[in-house]
Structure formats: C-alpha cells, structure tokens
C-alpha cells in the first residue's frame, strides 16, 4: 500500500497512517549464508533417510562429519524448514495453542476406494541458494498426488491454494493431517467443512499414519531434487511438476 514515488505524502507520513515503522520500509531481507544453506541441505538428507531422527541425533551426526554446530542451532534450522522427527508421542507436531483439535477417524478403517481418505503434508525442498517448502495432498488408496504447491515461506496461503486445487478435482470422505499449526489454523478446517469433508487429526501413537506421503517425499528427493539442485523456484516448479 506504500507509494514510494509520485505520492503527495512522504514515506514517514504513509508509515504513520499505516501504523508501520518507517525503518521497516527500507528493510532488505538478508539471504542465508552458504554455511546455513549447506546445513539445511544436510539436515534434509538426514531427515529423509531417518525421519525418526531428532535434534540430538542430527547434531551428533553433523559433528561426526566435522560440522561444529550445537543442538539449539539444529532446532532453529528444523523449525525454519518445518520438519519434526516422526516418533509416537503427544508432541509429534506442535499445534498452535487455542486452535481446535479434531478426533482421529481412521482407527481400524479399511481404505478400499479412491477419494475415501486424503492426507496432507509439508516438506523442505533444497535450492542451490536456499530452500522452498512443498505441500502435497495424497489419495491414500491410489497414492495419487491430487494437488501440490510450493512457496518460499511457511505461510498459510500456499497451503490453502493447494487445498483449493485438490477440491476443484474431487472431494474426499475423510481428510487426515497432523496437528501442525498450518492445519489447525481456522482457515483450513472451515474450508473443508464447507466442502462437507470429515476432518481427522493424528494424535498420540499415530507416527506412521503419514507414511505414504513420506515415501513420496523420499522418492521425489532421491530421484529428482538431489540429482538436480534447482537454481531458483521457477526451476524447482518445473522439475517437481515433471
């Protein structure tokens, strides 16, 4: 909304009207260093090989490889990448406090037809100079990728774009996901309820429910991403789409 040229109002006046800090109008994002990019890429490789690894295990492995890094830094990198170790427990994926939690609907359910159950998940995709976040929606019976989107930040809009793209093709009976904050945001369940979809949410002991999507991530990374480090988001979209 800021008009930097041709406005009768100064930037300072515009910042006051918009309740913004004037200095924020001059902020230039600082790209990650080569060392940070290398650490992110290696964390992604270790996580893809051993998704049950937590911050302690990854820290130990990187130290054995000669990378001087502490556990807090590993935890920060993992948060930025939106990944968490796949292990049973109440904190499998942290949800935003106050957001609604839905019941788990898949216990003892036989999945025997398309569009019976869909699952959604997010993963990190490496670039030469950084990374992207990729979200995909999978039909659990056919293992078909119904829709996918990628974005340079873990923000809610790209998840909703993926949801809309999937719902434009079909409507599942049950939509399952974990308790990550993207999936407990009000926008997400409200849209699914509008479409008449029953919402299922993983809870304690459901660490392996998303294994089909994790297998897709592994195949995608080893057969495409790791072989062709993308130079930019445009190249990543073309490669992933193929």
Image (cartoon, rainbow, N blue to C red):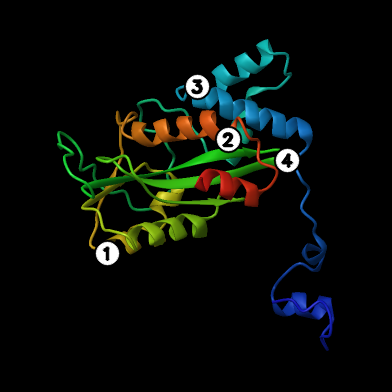
- In the picture shown, does residue 239 fall above or below 86? below
Disc 3 target residue:
49
- Classify 10 Å Cα crowding around label 4: few (below 14), some (14-19), many (20 and above): some
What is the quadrant of residue 202 in the picture? top left
Which comes sooner in the sequence, label 3 or label 4?
3
**Left or right: residue 55 compared with residue 97:** right
Whether residues under marks 3 and 4 lie with C-beta atoms below 8 angstroms apart, the answer is no
Residue at (41, 32) in percent of width and height: 214
| Camera-nearest residue between 15 and 235 | 235
Q: Where does residue 149 sit, x and y in percent of width and height? A: 49, 52
Pointer 2 or 3: first along the chain? 3
Q: Callout 2: 10 Å neighbours few (<14), some, many (20+)?
A: some
Identified at 20% across, 53% down, the residue is 173
Number of on-image labels: 4
* Inter-mark Cα distance, 2 to 3: 14 Å
Q: Which residue is the site of mark 4? A: 129
Mark 2 to mark 4: distance in Å? Answer: 14 Å
- Say which residue appears at 62% left-offset and 19% top-offset: 59
Residue 43 appears at what percent x and percent y?
A: 60, 27
Judged by depth in the image, the label closer to the viewer, 1 or 2, is 2
Residue found 76% across the figure and 53% down from its top? 29
User: Can residue 96 be seen by looking at this rendering?
Assistant: no
Q: Nearer the viewer, residue 120 or 88?
A: 120
Give how far apart the Cα atoms at labels 1 and 3 are: 36 Å
Cα separation, mark 3 vs mark 4, equals 22 Å
Q: Which residue is mark 2?
A: 225
Q: Which residue is mark 1?
A: 195
Q: Quick one: SS at disc 2? A: helix
């Amino acid at each position: 909304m800021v008009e930097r040229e041709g406005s009768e109002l100064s930037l300072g006046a515009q910042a006051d009207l918009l309740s913004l800090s004037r200095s924020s109008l001059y902020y230039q994002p600082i790209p990650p260093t080569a060392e940070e990019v290398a650490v992110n890429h290696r964390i992604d490789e270790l996580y893809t090989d051993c998704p049950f690894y937590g911050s302690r295990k990854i820290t130990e492995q990187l130290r054995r490889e000669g990378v001087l890094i502490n556990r807090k830094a590993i935890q920060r990198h993992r948060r930025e990448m939106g990944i968490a170790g796949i292990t049973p427990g109440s904190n499998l994926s942290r949800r935003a406090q106050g957001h609604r939690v839905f019941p788990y609907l898949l216990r003892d359910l036989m999945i025997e037809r398309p569009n019976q159950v869909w699952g959604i998940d997010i993963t990190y995709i490496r670039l030469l100079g950084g990374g992207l976040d990729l979200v995909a929606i999978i039909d659990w019976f056919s293992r078909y990728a119904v829709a996918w989107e990628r974005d340079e930040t873990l923000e809610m809009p790209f998840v909703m774009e993926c949801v809309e793209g999937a719902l434009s093709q079909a409507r599942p009976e049950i939509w399952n996901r974990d308790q990550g904050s993207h999936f407990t945001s009000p926008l997400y369940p409200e849209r699914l309820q509008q479409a008449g979809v029953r919402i299922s949410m993983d809870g304690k002991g459901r660490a392996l429910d998303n294994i089909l999507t994790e297998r897709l991530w592994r195949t995608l990374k080893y057969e495409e991403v790791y072989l062709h480090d993308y130079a930019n988001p445009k190249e990543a979209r073309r490669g992933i789409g193929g």
